[in-house]
Image (cartoon, grey):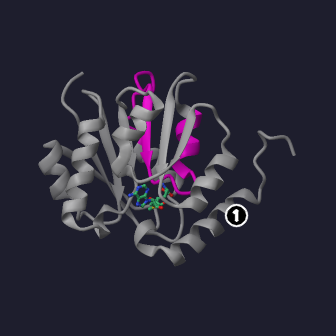
Amino acid sequence: MPENVRSPLKPLSEALLFASNFLRHPNMLGSIIPSSRFLVKQVLEPIDWERARVIVEYGPGVGTFTAEILRRMRPDAHLVAIETNRDFVRFLRRTWPDPRLHVVHDSEAQVRTILGQLGLPAPRYIISGIPLGSMPDPVRADIALQSRAALEPGGAFLVYQFTARALPVLQRTFGDVRRSFERRNLPPAQLFVCAMPGS
Ligand SMILES: C[S@@+](CC[C@H](N)C(=O)[O-])C[C@H]1O[C@@H](n2cnc3c(N)ncnc32)[C@H](O)[C@@H]1O
């Protein structure tokens, strides 16, 4: 089969890889299946693709968002996908050999170091699906602060979660947070758009 033709078995293998990792690391994944296309569409909706030269994704999993971001982003843009799970890192590197994609096996806590090592400027957007709700409050606070410090002025931290537990920390860090909801996801998801001041 040519490389650019998606095998009909691919969604099944992605789902199995995701589910088997959920059974081993339920708190790190937060859901047994990858995000739905409805959630992907809604989370990416605020992105100004023309201005997005660098995008960071925390916790890409099997690449449900990654694939759509690569499809929409500029040919000269960079996507830095930071993932702690080794199986997902291997899978992503094998599945999307796109020169614009940098799959990094590390924690989002290292975001600024990683961008420095790649020689990339501050990202316009950080997209995060890591389960902030199951983390202790100081860890959540640190993730929000690190993300704010990494973003360029006028950028945004786009967060999707299965609970609203992270909302207070996001509001404390970013001020105004725009909220919405996607019920056509399993489980239904909350979305938080945390905008940075500036243009
Ligand atoms: C809810 S899953 C989302 C997966 C995928 N983005 C999706 O929407 O289907 C959360 C992902 O975050 C990863 N993760 C959890 N903690 C992380 C951390 N501190 N840094 C980077 N990735 C992390 C998990 O391994 C998992 O792949």
Q: Residue at x 70, y 63 (%)?
A: 13
Observer-nearest residue: 132 or 107? Answer: 107
Q: Magenta includes 53?
A: yes
**In the figure, 164 relative to 178: above or below?**
below
Answer with the quadrant where ligand 1 appears in the image.
bottom left
**In the figure, 32 relative to 113: above or below?**
below
- Work out which quarter of the rendered image holds the C terminus and state it: top left
Quadrant in the rendering for residue 188: bottom left
Q: x, y (%) of residue 118?
A: 47, 32
Q: x, y (%) of residue 78?
A: 50, 30
Q: Magenta residues, as a range? A: 44-71
Q: Residue at x 77, y 56 (%)?
A: 8
Q: Is residue 62 left or right of residue 142?
A: right
Report if the beta carbon of the residue with label 1 is closer than 8 angstroms to ligand 1.
no
Q: Which residue is mark 1?
A: 13
Q: Magenta includes 109?
A: no
Instruction: Report the number of numbered marks.
Output: 1
Q: Which three-letter amino acid code belongs to the residue tagged 1?
A: Ser
Q: x, y (%) of residue 57?
A: 44, 45
**In the figure, 39 relative to 111: above or below?**
below
Furthest residue in direction right, as rendered? 1
Q: Residue at x 36, y 36 (%)?
A: 125
Q: x, y (%) of residue 11?
A: 68, 59
**In the figure, 187 relative to 76: above or below?**
below
Q: Residue at x 58, y 54 (%)?
A: 89
Question: Label 1 crowding class (10 Å Cα cut-off): few <14, some 14-19, many 20+?
Answer: few
